[in-house]
Amino acid sequence: MTKKTYRLDLEALSGRLGRGQGRNYWRSLDELAETDEFKEFLEQEFPNQISEWNDPVGRRRFLKLMGASLALAGATGCLHLPKETIVPYVQQPSEIEPGRPLYFATAMPVGGVATGLLVESHEGRPTKVEGNPQHPSTLGGTDVFTQASILGLYDPDRSQSVSYLGEIATWSGFIAAIQGVLGGQRAVQGAGLRLLTETITSPTLGSQIKTLLAGLPSAKWHQYEPAAPHNTKAGVQLAFGQPANAIYHFDKADVILALDADFLDSGPANIRYIRDFASKRKLTGGGTTMSRLYSVESNYTNTGAKADHRLPLRPSQIESFAAAVAAGVGAQTGLATGPVPAEWVNAVVTDLKEHRGASLAVVGEGQPPGVHRLGHAINQALGNVGNTVTYTDPVEENPVDQIASLADLVQDMNAGRVQALLIIGGNPVYNAPADFSFAEAMNNVPLRAHLALYNDETSQLCHWHVPEAHYLESWGDARAFDGTVTIMQPLIAPLYNGKSAYEFLATLTPRPETSSYEIVRAYWQTKNPGAGFETFWRKSVHDGFIANSALPAKTISAAGAANQGGQNSSQQTPAPGQPLYTPPSSQSSQTADMNGLEIIFRPDASVYDGRFANNGWLQELPKSVTKLTWDNAALLSVDTAKKLGLSYEIARRGGEHGQIIVDMVELELQGRKLKAAAWIVPGHANDCVTLHLGYGRTNSGRVGTGTGFNAYALRTSGSLWSAPGLQVRKLDDQYPLACTQFQHSMEGRDIVRHAALEEYQKDPGFAKGEFKNPLDTPSLYMSYDYDHGYKWGMSVDLNACVGCNACVVGCQAENNIPVVGKEQVMNGREMHWIRIDTYHVGQTSDPATYFQPVMCMHCENAPCEVVCPVQATTHSAEGLNVMVYNRCVGTRYCSNNCPYKVRRFNFLLFADWETPSLKLMRNPEVTVRSRGVMEKCTYCVQRISRAKIDAEREGREVRDGEIATACQAACPAEAITFGNINDPASKVAKLKAEPRDYGLLAELNTRPRTTYLAAVRNPNPELEKG
Amino acid sequence: MPQIFHRSTNTISRLTIFGSLFIVALLAWVLSEVGISSYATEAWNARQQPVQFSHKHHASDDGIDCRYCHTSVETSSFAGMPPTKTCMNCHRQIWADSPALEPVRDSFRTGKPIKWTRVNALPDFVYFNHSIHVNKGVGCSTCHGRVDQMPLTWQVATLQMRWCLDCHRNPESYVRPKDKVFDMSYEAPPDQEQLGQRLMTEYNIRSTAVLISCDTCHR
């Protein structure tokens, strides 16, 4: 009888820890443990005796139905093509040429901070988001949120009408209601009026609110966002006595110390930081030096994975570590140092000191303000200010302590001082600190209105709900992390009559129906009066940013840094009575209980603070290190799991290992309890648990509701990012998680290759190994002549890739790739054409991690092609391995014969063919696949065709760089390069000539067109010795 | 036990066995003929349109160039269908009261577009691009026939893959000088093969191997 599950025995693992030495890569703990049971389990990857599928439809019945529908499909195939109509314009806009997309510059704000974008529009439908290469702050990079925002726009679950007490209402009704309230509030100078917004960087919105408050001086503006840089701001305030915005220049830093800072995957500037960081790590064009990154962190993050040295510590220990480093480099600390690994501190301090002016200490948002102050002090002591770190004024319109701001509001609401609460964006009922009891407090307000994209948890408790216009539907403006202003232009009229924040605020003015366009334009006209305005406006809108609007670097002294202890310069007026919230002092509050567990909260890499919970692309995106989809989990280390008696079972469904059954735990923090699934992360710090925000939504739409566990239930204003005193109890309950990490086994093959910098300097060709590409091996199959015309190929730099997943979502958007849902991911049926494989090397307590994006290799000797019985996958003259969907009969032989496992099969009708709004979203250049069809990466053949046709029409060859595949265009690290290998001057040809170039499984003589540049790490010899 | 079957059944069975081969072959032939017949492909069927628009009148009698209405044929995958405005350019002056043109005027008045019936329809998994064909010397009439002689438009080819491949395999038999692309009355000269070879070099038409690669039309 075949075993359907395999439970990992952590005890067995500990006996084999020594195996994780050297170049032994592993993907999962089971692979490392290598028990006989696991091997047997693996060998039965396609067991014969699985009697019945788990689906409710039995196998026999399914086949019967399939047969019947096949017969019917055959019959309909003989009939005529369905009648089609052509519907031309009545008056065609002059810039639109049907069949040719247009690109418009705009920007997407997340947490208020904008990313410059170019959006592709087909006859008025935005279909794809790309970075704006001219934007001075982000330089054309994107992240998963911007890439997935196109699905957010067309999400059929978005709120579609104004409602009052749950009933459909009208916008004019809302205006009348607001104007009524406003009339009453004028008499009391707005004493009962409160605005609650998210972080606002928009100069126009800022000016609108300030004008409003000038007219109603007693009204108040509160800001709250759960994942805003609360501590970062407080840290700067503490260090310098004034608000400022620190900008790091990783392209100038030779030694970087990241203190719990995941600067590569979170934070407003991460797109630019990835680019700058990667530029110092590429080693292309004969480079032999690279920067060195030390990462001290608790959870395993992308930054930790890219680090040359990583030290897992609990949050409270990181504080001690920072203090020790600060003392070592001669910065004043004022913080007591706890026990920290001395050799680490010494090595880091020596390295930092050797690179004065070219080193950098970055402190993550999760650390308390005091540690941020240390970070600034370290940079100052090392002379980095002005070189690797610069300061500007804050990009926010009103940089307040948001927790204090929300506390103030809650107190006012509890005291009955609030007559009308207007919530503009955000979802405070769901994500406000648990100790604020926001929902109960809000019930005291007689009139509550909420502007939001979804009818969410907060909307449910508000009298009025107004659907918000998506950023692609409205005019607006916002600042990037460096202050550069983008005037955002809409790509489409609001699909559901949504209103922007500008229009919402305009209802409080004498002209309540002013459009966003008028408001934004009028604001900028006041800034640029005179005849030149029209030119300024047109140029700014066209370019996607206002020239030279980045905030200038300013010199700030660390006078405040000398102030030690709890002297806090909060600008908040203390509320009467017992304060609901005391801003954190510089002195740590976390040293209290070093023995218990600590909890860590972080924004999620996929759903952020919960706002993207209903985005299927993001939900199904395997998270960088854990490869979990559709859920968050309580992440803990191997040792902590062992202590708590936790493990997991790998289940087998659909012949794959996508379902992992894990133990449930109960987390208790300060009397609040939450049940969550426990997930073991090798390399996580011991004795702490990471829980990501944004899951456990109760009202987010059909996709997001009910996924994961709500971390906000435990999060209080005093434990924003971490807290001691966590109790974890194992429950007698299990939970299935969908994880893509277990699906393929390496079988000991040499897949990801890496070396230390020294080894690379000695032997640049280390990655080639013993194997030489067998160009002249005899073959039974006919060979192709690639010497003429184009020869497309790709190069992926493993040293640059930071595993951010932007390529995965970019590909999904470009190629109409469907979402399959948690059930099907557990069956191993996710459809991503590009995946990022994660490999670990070393001890389970602190492994090194390597990311490897894997897409179709477009083998010159493609194993898939020769086994297709219907020639549905064939070779093109330019070397592409092409898929012809309409020929495919779904034998899946090709997938079986593909050594890279990059082929994806539509087991069911995964593509949504019904929902009207999703039809608008599709890329018209790519076929929407049906059930029973194999698909895979095409090298974005539609983009190749477009560029070729454009070039041919102009009687020239395709220029190098003219074609960027969707993954390449999305990549903020510029790790992916595509082009014509036959052109020796092309970028890709040069990269393929690099000594680090190697082909994945090239020993199989597949001659892959996609090759990799092996990873190189730059370890500190001093730490290596230990 | 007596024989069940008479001796003559031997002949019948032989006939059936060998005859079935012919029957199968015949059936196959019939099917393939039906497949390319105008019954299946709807070629040669003039389509009814919301407005009785005559290409013959406009292109031939009035001498209007194809590109006056199909504006994007040289630059886009889609040849372009004229917006109502294009019709009204002339028809606000001539035949301004004609009852036949009422749907056009109605569209212009109300802003509701005219819904034309598509004549030359390709399956959705085929990505045909007009501009590249026109720019490489494939004339309108090569695929669309003498549209200038069609009162109501019909399709003249099967539009099946084998028909496409005819030309993609032997472009030299079909290409014409670029200045003749929009010439409806163009006839291939007797030396088409030589001319075709010369034009293929001149226009840098890709090798047959590229032209018949699947990704040229399917993605």
Image (spheres, rainbow, N blue to C red):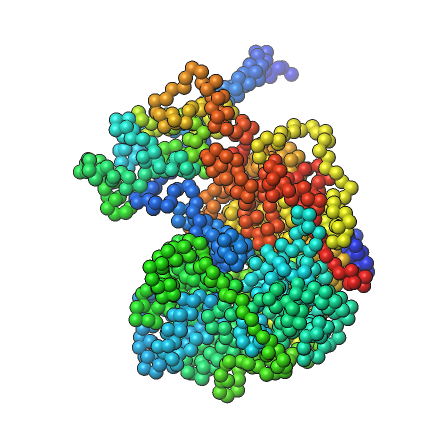
Image-based side of A458 in relation to A9, left or right: left
Q: In the image, is residue A720 above or below residue A652?
A: below
Residue A867 coordinates in the image, percent (x, y)? 64, 34
Residue A685 coordinates in the image, percent (x, y)? 70, 67
Q: In the image, is residue A332 above or below residue A87?
A: below
Q: Residue at x 22, y 37 (%)?
A: B91
Q: In the image, is residue B2 above or below residue B94?
A: above
Please state which of residues A62 and A828 is positioned toward the viewer in this rendering.
Answer: A828
- Residue B86, picture quadrant: top left
Q: In the image, is residue B121 above or below residue A376?
A: above
Please state which of residues A54 and A966 is positioned toward the viewer in this rendering.
Answer: A966
Q: Is residue A70 visible?
A: no
Q: Residue at x 71, y 36 (%)?
A: A1005
Residue B124 coordinates in the image, percent (x, y)? 45, 38
Q: Is residue A355 visible?
A: yes
Image-based side of B87 in relation to A908, left or right: left
Q: Residue at x 60, y 62 (%)?
A: A249
Residue B36 coordinates in the image, percent (x, y)? 44, 25
Please state which of residues A303 and B204 is positioned toward the viewer in this rendering.
Answer: B204
